[in-house]
Image (cartoon, grey):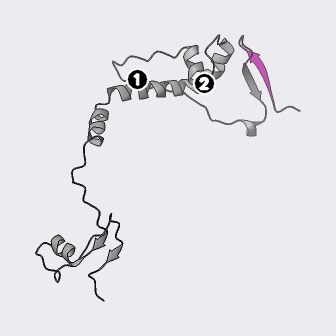
Amino acid sequence: GFSSVYRLTGADGKQRQWFVFEPALVLPEYLVELEYLPIGATAEREPSASQLLELAGLSPTAPSDAEAVDLANLTRPLARFAQQCAIASAADPYDDVCTAALNMPPPLKQRTKIFRITQELLLLQSADGSRERLEHVNLHGNSIRKLECFEC
């Protein structure tokens, strides 16, 4: 026999009422859309059919009711997300601060590149002018081609 049957409900022909006769096929899971509104907050306006079609990437010219019904469940959460992103990006004061910080000049002067390490250059770079007490030489960011003053 049959394990399930359905009956059309509603005028659009897309809504169905299911009757399942096999208990193993029944899943106790439900998709629930919930919107939390604090006391004193106003509910957001639901997006129109043309906004839903635009968000879905479809042509907003002459949207049919059937298309809007089909897309409503998929695009409604996306429309709310897009609205919240637009509100947050317009009201975010940190964007201007971050942009200003990124456009600032570098705090350190750029050093000239060193292509050759010599005895005189090491003496100039050391704090006390003594090569014997020099322990660490940072050569990062230079295009060193020749080391003249190091002995094995």
Per the image, is 9 magenta?
yes
In this view, the mark in front (1 or 2): 2
Quarter of the rendering containing residue 90: top left
Q: Residue at coordinates 34% horizontally, 75% vertically from top-left? A: 146
Residue 37 numbered mark, or none: 1
99 on left or right of 109 = right
* Element under disc 2: loop
Q: Residues within 10 Å of mark 1 (few under 14, many from 20)?
A: few
Magenta span of residues: 1-14
Quarter of the rendering containing residue 131: bottom left
Q: Check if mark 1's residue and mark 2's residue have beta carbons within 8 Å.
A: no
Residue indicated by mark 2 = 57
Mark 2 residue type: Gly
Whether residue 119 is situated above or below residue 103 in the rendered picture: below
- The percent position of residue 85, horizontal first and vertical second, equals 42, 29
Mark 1 residue type: Leu
